[in-house]
Amino acid sequence: MTQRTPAPARASSAETQPVELLSREPKGSFANVLVPIDLSDTSERAIRWALKQSTPKTKTIRVLMLCEDRDCDASDLVRFLSRFGEQPRALMHGQLFSGNEDQLCAMIREEGIDKIVVGVGDEPSSEGGALAQRLARMCPCGVVMVPRREPVRELVRTQGFTAPRGKPLEDSSPL
């Protein structure tokens, strides 16, 4: 187990007090999955991991192109998604998103997203890793981080999280 100090995060209305995160192997429902992307190799890796994990219960893999500081072109998103071809198990569709993190979390709640899958780079200070931590603190669902190398980890909030009676939290390390 390793204890990590959190990186300074942007102030948000959802972050009134510190939230402890738990890192574990991804578990739980993958019915409605959100994959925020920036058209990078790490984004492609995250989508491929989400497709590989899809089951007959997976309904939707929503690929969300984040358009914070740059112009977004839907044709770039369509071209990026064409790499993955037709998917037999889940409906995969793309969407442009230009809101802030609070608006993103509101959309996640409204749409009933079960998991967020984020590709992260090798650097601990990578943008994908920072985004994953912010979303895990603000949103009601787990955030799966897909790094270049194994293992894939899921960040979940420890507030309100309890292990089954009599069983310790296995394979987890607090961040």
Image: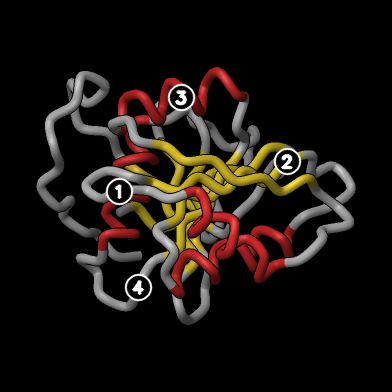
Task: Measure the C-alpha gap from mark 1 to mark 4.
Answer: 23 Å
Q: Residue at x 60, y 32 (%)?
A: 113
Q: Earlier in the sequence, mark 2 or mark 3?
A: 2
Image quarter of the C terminus: bottom left
Please give the residue where the numbered disc 1 appears in the rendered image: 71
In the picture, the disc for residue 114 is none
In the rendered image, residue 59, in percent from the top left (x then y), is placed at: 79, 39
The numbered mark, 1 or 4, whose residue comes first in the sequence reads 1
Residue type (three-letter) at the residue carrying disc 1 = Asp
Distance (Cα) linking label 4 and label 3: 30 Å
Mark 1 touches mark 4? (CB < 8 Å):
no
The answer to whether 26 is drawn above or below residue 66 in the figure is: below
Of the residues shown, which amino acid type is indicated by label 2?
Answer: Thr
Foreground mark, 1 or 4, reads 1
- Give me the C-alpha separation between circle 4 and circle 2: 25 Å
Question: Residues under labels 2 and 3: Cα distance?
Answer: 27 Å
